[in-house]
Amino acid sequence: MVNQEPEIKGCWVMGADCGEQKHRFVMLDEPKDRQGTLWVSNRMDKVRDALTKMLIKLPEGYELEIVTEGLRSIGGMLMQAATELGIRIYQVNPKALDSYRSLEGQPRKDDDRDAELLAKMRLNNVEGCRLALDSRSEERVLCRFTRLHTQLVGQKRRAVNRVRSRLLELSPEVVDSQWDGPGYSSTGMRMLLERWPGFEGMEKTRVSTIERILRPVTRQGEGCTKMAKAVLEMAGRIILGAEERRVISMELDMAMQQLRLTKTSLAKIDKEIKNAVQAHPIGRKLLEIPGVGQFTAGVLIGEILPLARNVSEGKTATYGGITPLSRRSGKSEGRSKLARGINKHAVRALYLSAVSAKQCSALDDAYYQKQLKRHKGHPKPHVKSFLSLARQRFKVMYKIMTTDARYDKETLIRSHLKRQEFERTQKKDGLAA
């Protein structure tokens, strides 16, 4: 006897409005009638029990699907419990829910009503409702690491900008391109500000003392003496009031502490990303592509790979933000925006990877130059050309992630030369005609 799988007759949908303390579950059948409602505490055992109760209510041959807004933080417990029970989860963009709430005539946010609307969005196949990514443990780990890395880079950038703005108040000459001393964002300037926040007391210091601090962290060699003299003279020209200068010194000291902490944290995260990528079989293949480093490979595995396993290359590229699709339509004026539903972490990594590839790969540089000529007259031809290069490179990345293929430079060069020959032939035939 062969056991046949039960026939799937239909599907009921449960909308879940997640909160920090409690979740609201509303289950609808296919005619959109309520078949069950629950308030559930945000605890793993409570969420698992509630999902089991909903599954018991299903008629024979019916499946359950869950629709919610966020799958991280407050929705994390729901995501884990549903994955354990083998329930498909759909995710709704918060802006799409706001639009649907207005369409249904709901004047304000209500947990019970929002849970019902989430279920209706799935039953009505609303565009803003999409299947959640089926990611694996190692992919989720890399996703968290790369996103944390991006956050730390942003914190570092903001701290450097704070230092620059405070230095402009103390002595604008420090940020001038003609400044003979260490750059405002250099390691030398950080060492000086850690020793003398706000340059307080530096005017009484000897040139040799400043030079001794700068020499180990700069590449100027004998030029350190000139740099030290420039810093000492600059410190003597600061005429800001004592109290105001003390406050600025405190701000600079706090910014220096943040920079030190961020630098240490980034080094730790970089090491973790490197180890995770090299331990992943697809990660090792991605590193063979020019312009793909540890961080880019980590983003591709954490953000793109879960989707690439389930949808086509074109849809995956759209999710990665490197297709020309936009929300601009008709005769609307102004700057067009990327289509909704793109992954901002992926598009940033793919774009920067294309910029890096232009410098280290003659093949990528040739394609970039071709696109630069093609987009001549565009307001930002270099940006458009890099996006085109990123789109072309993504075809190779997608194949490497979804098949057993590896990066082969010689095959790509032969394909490039063959395409060039075909274009030349087409051009000659057009001129002859």
Image (spheres, rainbow, N blue to C red):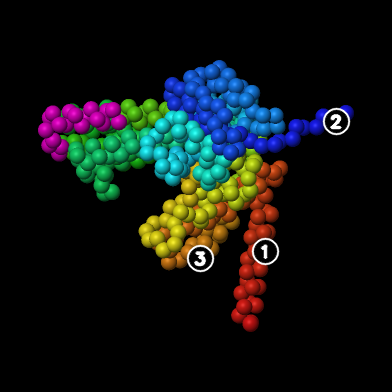
In front here: 308 or 71? 71
The residue carrying pointer 2 sits among few (fewer than 14), some (14 to 19) or many (20 or more) residues within 10 Å by Cα, namely few
Question: Quadrant location of residue 135?
Answer: top right
Query: Which region shows up in magenta?
Result: 237-255
Membership of 250 in magenta stretch: yes
In this orientation, does residue 390 appear? no
Residue at the (71%, 36%) spot, across then down: 8
Question: How many numbered badges does the structure rendering display?
Answer: 3
| Rendered location of residue 260, percent (x, y) | 36, 28
Judged from this view, the residue extending furthest toward the right is 1
Going from N to C along the chain, the mark reached first, 1 or 3, is 3
* Secondary structure of the residue carrying numbered label 1: helix
Residue at the (49%, 37%) spot, across then down: 117
What is the CA distance from the residue labelled 1 to the residue labelled 2? 53 Å
* Secondary structure of the residue carrying numbered label 2: loop
Q: Is residue 62 left or right of residue 338?
A: right
Give the number of the disc on residue 374: 3
| Rendered location of residue 121, percent (x, y) | 52, 41
Question: What residue would you read off at disc 2?
Answer: 2
